[in-house]
Amino acid sequence: MGVRSIIGLAVVLAGCGLLPAGRTAVTLPGGEGYGPVPVVLDDPGAVVATVDVGPTDADSFPPTVAVRDGDSVVVGWLGGACDDRTRLRVVAREAEIGITIHTDQKLGLGCTAVGIRRSVTITFNAPLGGRSVVLDEAN
């Protein structure tokens, strides 16, 4: 393999959107009048095993977190048609796990003023044990 091939491969891989360690992503499906929304989960403590599209009937207003079983939670929030992406941050502390939700909006006009239920299911690497899961303030 020549130098040009290696450089070309590196450029292609860099453009594939590979996420750095500690980050996971899932795309929430779109619907009538709004497109799909990527959700990027930042996990600096490496406590998350997976993040998946959550149930469509999850509580979403105000933002909620509900323990689903011993090692997973459903996080719900109210989004909108102008959502560009949502960033979640999971921070493990001794007695609890904090989750921050931040949604970036698209620039420009043309979005309908409609509330859209959004949710993800987060599965942790280990059972929660006695730790609670709380929503932290967005930064």
Image: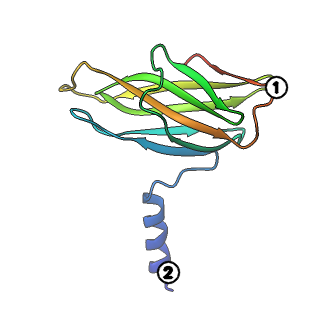
Badge 1 is on which residue? 94
The residue furthest top is 62
State whether residue 61 is above or below residue 126: above
Q: In the depicted view, which residue is nearer to us: 113 or 43?
A: 113
Circle 1/circle 2 CB separation < 8 Å? no
The residue furthest bottom is 1
Q: In the depicted view, which residue is nearer to us: 128 or 139?
A: 128
How far apart marks 1 and 2 lie (CA) works out to: 49 Å
Q: Earlier in the sequence, mark 1 or mark 2?
A: 2
Residue 13 in sight from this viewpoint: yes
Badge 2 is on which residue? 3
Type of amino acid under label 2: Val
10 Å neighbourhood of mark 2: few (<14), some, or many (≥20)?
Answer: few
- Location of the C terminus (image quadrant): top right
Disc 2 element:
helix
* Left or right, 7 with reference to 35: right
Q: Position of residue 109 (x, y in %)?
A: 19, 25
Label 1 or label 2, whichever lies nearer to me, is 1
Q: Position of residue 78 (x, y in %)?
A: 41, 21
